[in-house]
Amino acid sequence: MTDQAILECLNRRDEKGLAAVQAQYSGYCYSVAYNILGNSEDAEECVNDMLIKVWNAIPPAQPESIGAYAAAAARNLAKNRWKSMHAQRRSGTEAEIALEELVSVPRADDDVEREVDSHELGQAFNRFLDSVSEKQRKIFIQRYWFMMPVEDIAADLGLPKSTVTVTLVRLRKKLRAYLKKEGLL
């Protein structure tokens, strides 16, 4: 079933649309959640929660890509679950390792200021990603959005692990310099 057909079913509140989301995207969403959580039961729960979230959000949401929408929902659910599970302890999961690799940005004290800073940072990340090659962008997004292990990124892109590792190091340095130039660091 195409994304447009799924969207039409969901808009009509037809459960066939939800079944199609599950059939077509649950495996991908499971991978995203598992890369963050490192636990199959928690990843399965995130996929189930994602299905509920998609059902409740459409309508009124009208995403262009159901797969991307479902993956983003699964990612956000997994991140929230990970944060609540690891509030006081550290586990060394792929998400923790990937997040430690990225630069930390100081948070503003005021909620409004924090939201503005977050929006500006998001825009800066988008501009930065637009400035790098497609291969570099794929590596960066797979590592820091989908929290994929370096080995899996290398296998997915047909590259040696060392190439992916070196690319990530260089991208983090470029990102740090870019954020400093933009006045965000």
Image (cartoon, helix red, strand yellow):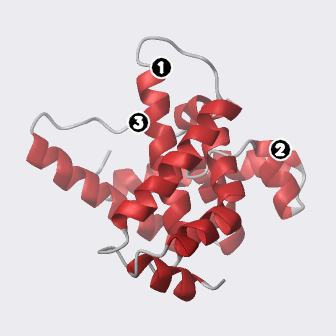
**Mark 2 belongs to which amino acid?**
Glu
Q: Quadrant of residue 95?
A: top right
Between disc 3 and disc 1, whose residue precedes? 1
Residue drawn at (31%, 59%) of the image: 182
SS label for mark 3: loop
Distance of label 3 from label 2 (alpha carbons)? 24 Å
For the C terminus, which image quadrant?
top left
**Mark 3 belongs to which amino acid?**
Ser
In-image side of 151 versus 82 (left or right): right
Question: x, y percentage for residue 100?
Answer: 54, 31
Number of the label disc, if any, that sits on residue 86: 1
Between disc 3 and disc 2, whose residue precedes? 3
The mark closer to the camera, 1 or 2, is 1
Query: Which residue does the numbered mark 2 point to in the structure image?
Result: 151
Tell me whether the residue at label 3 lies in contact with that at label 2, contact meaning CB atoms closer than 8 angstroms. Answer: no
The mark closer to the camera, 3 or 2, is 2
Q: Please tell me how many numbered marks the rendered image carries.
A: 3
Residue drawn at (46%, 44%) of the image: 77
SS label for mark 1: loop
Query: Which residue does the numbered mark 3 point to in the structure image?
Result: 104
For the N terminus, which image quadrant?
bottom right
**Mark 1 belongs to which amino acid?**
His
| Mark 1 crowdedness (10 Å alpha carbons): few <14, some 14-19, many ≥20 | few
Question: x, y percentage for residue 52?
Answer: 45, 54
Distance of label 3 from label 1 (alpha carbons)? 18 Å
Q: Nearer the viewer, residue 85 or 104?
A: 85
185 vs 122: above or below: above
Between disc 1 and disc 2, whose residue precedes? 1
SS label for mark 2: helix
The mark closer to the camera, 3 or 1, is 1
